[in-house]
Amino acid sequence: MNRARLVLLALMFLTPPATLIGFGSYYLWEHDRLWVWWPLLACFGIAYFLSWRWTRRGGGVLPKTEVPPPGYWTDRDRIAWEKVDAKAKSFESVSLDQISNARHYTEIALDLATEVGLVFNPDSEDPFDNLTLPEVLACVELAAADLEGMVQKYIPGVHMLRIRDVKRAKKAYNLYKAGQDVYWVGAAVVSPISTGLRYLASRGAIGTLMNRIQSNLILWFHTAYIHQVGRYLIELNSGRLKVGVKRYREILAAHQEPPADNVADRTAGPTAEATVEATTPGATAATPAAPTKAITIAVLGPVKAGKSSLVNALLGKQLATVDRLPVASGIRYDTKLAGGQPVTLFDTSGYGEQVSDHDFAAAVEASRDADLILLVTPAMSPGRVADVDLLDRLKAWFAEKPHLRMPPVVTVVNQVDLLSPKAEWAPPYDWKSGSRPKEANMRECVAAVKEQVGPRAADIVPVCARSGETFGIVDGLVSVVVSHLDHARGAAILKAFDAAAGERPVGKMADQLGNVMSAGMNALAGWLKKK
Ligand SMILES: Nc1nc2c(ncn2[C@@H]2O[C@H](COP(=O)(O)OP(=O)(O)OP(=O)(O)O)[C@@H](O)[C@H]2O)c(=O)[nH]1
Ligand SMILES: [Mg+2]
């Protein structure tokens, strides 16, 4: 269709409304009712204001494209994400030319891949060197699937919009502007005053509004593209896509938070029995009824600190053996927090005043499995050198594995009943602000432990785990554990990816060789048949 025909069509479309507006305005002017324009102009004003508000960057009607960084991301992942986000925000506006040009996307993807790759392999000449083809394809698949979902959901009619249409949109937009000018000239001839007024309002409001909505939508898509590609480039470089798309999705789904209706009653006035309900001990597998994977809580600490007693207090049952010779390897007990989060309590054997290499190996073994660590330390303990040493060594161990995260540590100050005045035991105690001597001593003891352990622990909770005399377990410790569940889940997810990536590499090779061989045999059989 040539330009003259388009202009003719535009004229024919615009003539009827222009004529009506002209006659209408003339009528209003004749009958002295020009004031009708003022409420109409007010409408324009309000629409303009709303459009301005709704099309502001970040304050728009479209959802945010930066999916909040997943809880399981490591520090390194977050550094890479900052680069991705900065890249997305570096585009103040995007043109229709850019949005419809395939090279533009390729360039951005390569730029991002290099930037993210360098965060993970700073010394590498080519940050793509360490990646495998299936991983890269998994990254493309996941980013594309997410982006497709977002676009289908939020851009009306996108399924009918061809790339060609986007390219044409720019031309059409220019033609529309030309047609609009013709219309204004025509209307001005019929009714100069009202046309002048409307022209001003339209240029100020409608024109800007259309421009803003259009560029807002384009920028939204562009930002979504950068965020999604960046997000999966981080997953790719961290090695989490080694497991393949299917397994990747399965692992994330298995570590979801339990359904919200359960979560709500987690915090509702708990009683000892209601907050922690024990299930079968011994078995490590998660309860089949629970779709959520169990969080493993390792209970570490010096010998006779009361670790097994604490496990019993948390289970609400006497399952762990107290006052026995330490068991060589730990014992696991499966239970559930109120709210449905399955947890496995891992009761370990303790260490002496100095952490021997053997003790440390056992603690590493337990922590490697753990998603959260309860470090039990007796209130009357004169020093905590061994505890601090253990945490430092664990931290160093995890620091060498930047694809994992050290589980959060909660220090449990046990045996607070032995604090002065020793003869008195009348719980509950308000150790945070109470004025009884025992309360003040608990506060002092917690402060001392805090000073000794420092930032190595995320929280410190005083408890009494002695059977029949428990204090601080449900209201104190369980609530604190719940507050660190997200972090614990993050540690669990990273470990699950790590374990899955190391699964059956030899078996997989054998499968692939088998596939190649059977394809070869089929081809040979086909060739022989033809002969
Ligand atoms: N007074 C008091 N005694 C406690 C408390 N918690 C545990 N105990 C006692 O401390 C002793 C050791 O408790 P366990 O639970 O076996 O300690 P553990 O850390 O598991 O010991 P090992 O496994 O041998 O390292 C037992 O006699 C418990 O009754 C407490 O809060 N107050
Ligand atoms: Mg024990």
Image (cartoon, rainbow, N blue to C red):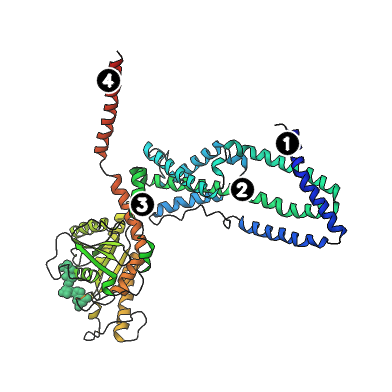
The answer to whether mark 2 is within 8 Å of ligand 1 is no
Q: Amino acid at mark 2?
A: Ser
Q: Amino acid at mark 3?
A: Leu
Residue 417 at least partly seen: yes
Crowd rating for badge 3 (residues with CA inside 10 Å; few <14, some 14–19, many 20+): some
In the rendered image, which residue does mark 3 sit on? Answer: 252
State the residue at coordinates (33%, 46%). Answer: 247
Crowd rating for badge 1 (residues with CA inside 10 Å; few <14, some 14–19, many 20+): some
Crowd rating for badge 2 (residues with CA inside 10 Å; few <14, some 14–19, many 20+): few
What whole-number distance in Å separates the C-alpha atoms at marks 4 and 3? 43 Å
Q: Position of residue 176 (x, y in %)?
A: 71, 42
In this rendering, which labeled residue sits more in front, label 4 or label 3? Answer: 4
Please determine whether, in this image, residue 387 is positioned above or below residue 202.
below
Q: Regarding mark 4 in the picture, which secondary structure is present there?
A: helix
Q: Regarding mark 3 in the picture, which secondary structure is present there?
A: helix
In the rendered image, which residue does mark 2 sit on? Answer: 93
In the rendered image, which residue does mark 4 sit on? Answer: 525
Q: Position of residue 216 (x, y in %)?
A: 60, 50
In this rendering, which labeled residue sits more in front, label 4 or label 1? Answer: 1
In the rendered image, which residue does mark 1 sit on? Answer: 6
